[in-house]
Image (cartoon, rainbow, N blue to C red):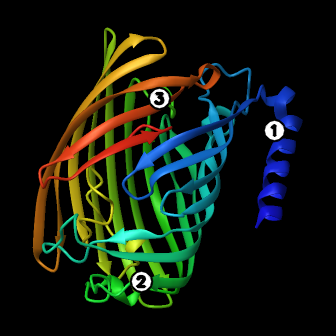
Amino acid sequence: MKTTILLLFSFFLFVQLQAQNKYNLKFSGIALPSKTPESGWAVQGGLVGLFKTDTADTNLRSSNLYLFGMYSQLKQFRISNGGEVFFKKEKYYLNYWIYYTYAPEQFFGSIPNTNYNKYDFIAKNLFYADVVFLRKIRKNTFFGFNVTAEKSFNFKTDTAGYFENAYPVNKFQNYNLLALGLKYQYDSRNSVVNTTKGNFVSLVAKPGFTSKGNYFQTRFDARKFIPYKKQVFAFQLFADKIFGFAPLGEMPNLNLRAFHPNLYKGTFSTYLQAEQRWCLKPWLYFSTFEGTGWVTLQNKSVWQSNYGGGFRVRVIKAYNLFLRVEYGLGSDGSSNLYLAFYDAF
């Protein structure tokens, strides 16, 4: 594993050095602590790269690439590579994430009988790849393919019974998955990193085939960013539906800040969240947020809401890359601290 990580790091560094002059590529190494409900405290680090596929095109948005490693207090580790690439004249768009991970995590059973104080620990090794490749069909509008592949193995769980008695995820312990779908995307954001204005809408329809069963997934994501003086108002409406049986990682959840991703899992989820960011200094933002949504499983639903706030500190000026520090509180009593490099949406 150490040799594989070293080779990946060396190859990525070599490619960036070779491309630096042609694509005006800038890159930096970074190592910072992080905190999320699914990993607890962690340290992650690696390389962040920003570039343009055509430096003469002032309307072309910047592309980004990442190579990261992570190790958490739950003894999780991950090596990942991914990013978003806008090709010349934005005629094509590529978004991909590839990672290998060992991921012990908490599982809380099936809704509505879930409680953030009662859970199993489950663990597995996972190879994961998700690739989106789109072609521009008109201004800011793209259409193309979304492919997801997974291999889960060495699954383990403790004996509390929340996983073994849950529906329907106990079917999926060790499995292989391939999902092939179509994606529509409208994207007028001024930047994909620290967006301050523009709109984003995506719709995915994707059948999935696994060694344990098949499913069909539809996913809708709409975001709007409105600048006003030194503020940014951001909104997101999200809906996710699974027909059939899917692995735990593909099942819809209530992805609002405060809640563990495995706490409210079902076959349908939808939520609306809003965020306000104040620019105190070019390198410092203060934020508040709130949201509400529900999850459905076997005709049983759970409705929850959240609120919270925090701040963002710029850590790499060349990329306008910020470290986000926020605290979220949920209507069920859940609360969590977040430290992350990326925006919530």
Residue 329 at x, y percent in the picture? 20, 44
Q: Give x and y (percent) for residue 316.
A: 61, 24
**Closer to the camera, 11 or 43?**
43
Give how far apart the Cα atoms at labels 1 and 3 are.
Answer: 23 Å
Frontmost residue, 53 versus 193? 193
Residue 307 is labelled as none
- Tell me residue 91's x, y (percent): 62, 40
Q: Residues within 10 Å of mark 2 (few under 14, many from 20)?
A: some
Query: Which element is circle 3 on?
Result: loop
Q: Look at 33% across and 60% down and name the residue there.
A: 261
Residue bearing mark 1: 16
Q: First in sequence: mark 3 or mark 2?
A: 2
Residue at (28% x, 73% y) in the render: 119
The kind of residue on which mark 3 rests is Asn
Measured in 3D between alpha carbons, the distance from the residue under mark 2 to the one under mark 1, in whole angstroms, is 41 Å
- In primary-sequence order, the first of circles 2 and 1 is 1
Going by the numbered disc 2, the residue's amino acid type is Thr
Whether the residues at callouts 2 and 1 have beta carbons within 8 Å, the answer is no
| Residue wearing tag 3 | 194
Q: Is residue 74 left or right of residue 135?
A: left
Q: Single out the mark in the foreground, 3 or 2.
A: 2
